[in-house]
Structures are given as structure tokens and as C-alpha cells.
Amino acid sequence: AAATAAPAPSGLKSTKITVTVNNPVKYTAIMRFIHSIEANLTKMQLSGVSLRKDAADTVNVDPLTVEVYIR
């Protein structure tokens, strides 16, 4: 069953953007990027992340979908 998206908080609108990363990318770099999105003061949320191991310290990342809440 598909997950239903949560409604935007009262008084806010949301928009989705897609972020494409140049692959391969260092695992620590992509994790820092993801943490920055999730910890941002402007409410942003990832709707899915897909990582595949490439070499010892790199991964391949599918495009990221980020939902941004705006007024």
C-alpha cells in the first residue's frame, strides 16, 4: 500500500523539488547534505532516499525529492 502524504501545517503551502547528485559521491558528504536538509530552519523533508554502495567510501544516489514548506 502506498503511503499517504501528511497535509501541510496550517497556514503553510508545500512544494516539491528534485535534487540530482553527481555520482558516485562520498558517503559522508551525502549524509552531511541530508542532515543539512532535515535540520534546516525552513521546514524541509525528504520523501525518499536510495543509496547503493559503489566503492569503499562512495555511494550512488538516486534523485532526491525534497518537500519544502513555505508561507
Image (cartoon, rainbow, N blue to C red):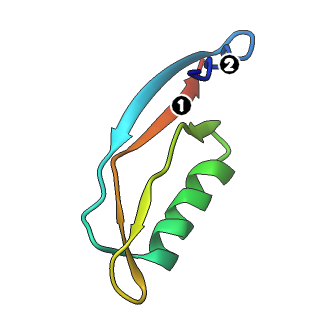
Q: Position of residue 33 (x, y in %)?
A: 50, 62
- Disc 2 residue type? Ala
Residue for badge 1: 68
Residue for badge 2: 6
* Image side of residue 63 versus residue 49, left or right: left
In the displayed orientation, state which residue is furthest to the right: 10
Q: Nearer the viewer, residue 54 or 65?
A: 54
Question: Could you tell me which secondary element the residue under label 2 belongs to?
Answer: loop
* Image side of residue 9 versus residue 13, left or right: right
Residue at image point 35% right, 38% down: 18
In this view, 68 is above or below 21: above
Q: Position of residue 43 (x, y in %)?
A: 65, 36
The dot on residue 42 is: none
Q: Position of residue 21 (x, y in %)?
A: 30, 58
* Image side of residue 56 versus residue 71, left or right: left
In this view, 17 is above or below 5: below
